[in-house]
Image: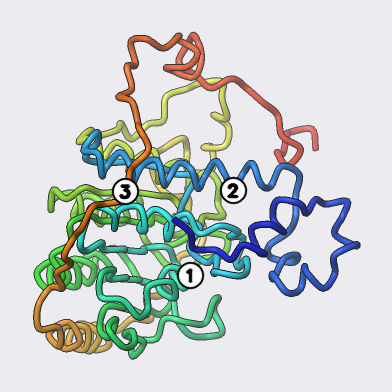
């Protein structure tokens, strides 16, 4: 299973911060530096988040899990031969390739505020993967792709679905639009498995984003896709207000488990002060509310065009399977056999505290 070029991966494995000046041309060739900086242990970082998504897909294939979660994954901008937008290895593409070993059709959904360009590009000419991206578009917003008319090519025509939005979209608008589009997608494409990228930069109050989604609006999309009862891999993605990101993915973990969380975040010693920004509540901290520039008329036009595109598909594609490539053996996890530190992240149910150079403290 391979997506990225060998020379690109080879370079990632050898480059280190102290060697950058020796490889100026290669750094430019592979789009490294600036928004894709080189840092210590970068390869280990890539292996871990990518391995998590591939392992999740493998567990779905082997029917060891119905739902797999990898909040460290979702790096959707990485291309075949270059890094992009803080993304180095595209774990989503590799996970989808793994799922295609057992499923004729795989659906990819992206609710990050940025267009899922790397995943769309990887599957732009195939009918076995449908990519659906809800994102901010226009005003030179990164990555600048994902127009409504970008629908795929050749066998993949109409299998790329882009839902471009303007600033300030709120829960009512977004969730209604999401459900409208995804009902049609599920009816027309009939996927065997789903990959859902849950970038938290589409929340209100994100330092880079410009949407007005609440934790509930964001998680309503997750709950809606769970309701189809298909094998689903859920990943993280972008998110630049750390306290909101943590709230979002904790809440969506609960959603996927069919649980609900209390509004008050319980006191604890691990990073509790991070949540003072919203009075220690399970809600997105949004000091500035952005006007919704998506008019009802624009949304109805979006719905109509997306529906017309989807109805251009005559039927869901079928694939004749021969012998599937072997999956790695994934043993069933026995939590009772784990030590307390491994099972709960510490004897009192907390992660071990580790300070990082990039953290901020009261005395700074």
Report the residue at 56% width, 57% height from top: 89
Q: Tag 2 or tag 1, which sits nearer the N-term?
A: 2
Q: Tag 3 or tag 2, which sits nearer the N-term?
A: 2
Q: Disc 2 on helix, strand or loop?
A: helix
Which percent across, then down, holds residue 247? 43, 41
From the image, tell me which residue sits under label 1. Answer: 118
Q: Give 45 or 34, whichever is nearer the viewer.
A: 45
Q: CA distance from mark 3 to mark 1?
A: 18 Å
Q: Give 151 or 266, whichever is nearer the viewer.
A: 151
Which percent across, then down, holds residue 181? 19, 72
Q: Give 7 or 354, whichever is nearer the viewer.
A: 7
Q: Does 294 sit above or below residue 276?
A: below
Q: CA distance from mark 1 to mark 2?
A: 16 Å
From the image, tell me which residue sits under label 3. Answer: 233
Q: Disc 3 on helix, strand or loop?
A: strand
Q: Disc 1 on helix, strand or loop?
A: helix
Report the residue at 53% width, 85% height from top: 139
Q: Is residue 292 left or right of residue 72?
A: left
Looking at the image, do the residues carrying marks 3 and 1 touch, with CB atoms under 8 Å apart? no
Rendered image quadrant of residue 4: bottom right
Residue 228 appears in the rendering: yes
């Amino acid at each position: 299973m391979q997506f990225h070029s060998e020379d690109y991966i080879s370079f990632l494995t050898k480059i280190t911060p102290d060697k950058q000046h020796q490889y100026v041309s290669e750094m430019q060739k592979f789009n490294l530096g600036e928004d894709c900086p080189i840092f210590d242990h970068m390869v280990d970082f890539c292996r871990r988040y990518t391995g998590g998504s591939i392992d999740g897909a493998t567990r779905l294939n082997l029917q060891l899990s119905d739902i797999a979660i990898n909040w460290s994954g979702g790096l959707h901008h990485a291309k075949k031969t270059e890094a992009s937008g803080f993304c180095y290895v595209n774990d989503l593409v590799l996970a989808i390739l793994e799922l295609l070993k057992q499923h004729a059709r795989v659906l990819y959904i992206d609710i990050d505020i940025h267009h899922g360009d790397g995943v769309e590009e990887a599957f732009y000419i195939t009918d076995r993967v449908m990519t659906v991206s809800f994102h901010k578009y226009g005003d030179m917003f990164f990555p600048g792709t994902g127009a409504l008319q970008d629908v795929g090519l050749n066998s993949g025509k109409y299998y790329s679905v882009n839902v471009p939005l303007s600033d300030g979209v709120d829960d009512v608008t977004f969730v209604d639009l999401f459900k409208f589009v995804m009902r049609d997608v599920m009816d027309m494409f009939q996927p065997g498995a789903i990959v859902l990228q849950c970038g938290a930069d589409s929340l209100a109050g994100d330092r880079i984003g410009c949407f007005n989604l609440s934790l509930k609006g964001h998680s309503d999309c997750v709950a809606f896709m769970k309701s189809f009862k298909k094998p689903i891999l859920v990943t993280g993605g972008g998110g630049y207000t750390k306290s909101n990101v943590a709230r979002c993915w904790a809440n969506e973990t609960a959603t996927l488990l069919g649980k609900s969380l209390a509004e008050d975040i319980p006191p604890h010693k691990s990073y509790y002060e991070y949540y003072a920004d919203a009075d220690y509540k399970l809600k997105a901290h949004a000091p500035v509310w952005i006007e919704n520039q998506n008019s009802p008329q624009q949304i109805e036009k979006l719905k109509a065009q997306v529906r017309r595109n989807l109805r251009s598909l005559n039927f869901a594609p079928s694939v004749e399977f021969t012998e599937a490539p072997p999956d790695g053996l994934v043993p069933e996890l026995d939590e009772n056999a784990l030590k307390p530190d491994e099972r709960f992240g510490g004897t009192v149910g907390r992660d071990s505290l580790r300070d990082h150079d990039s953290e901020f403290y009261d005395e700074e």
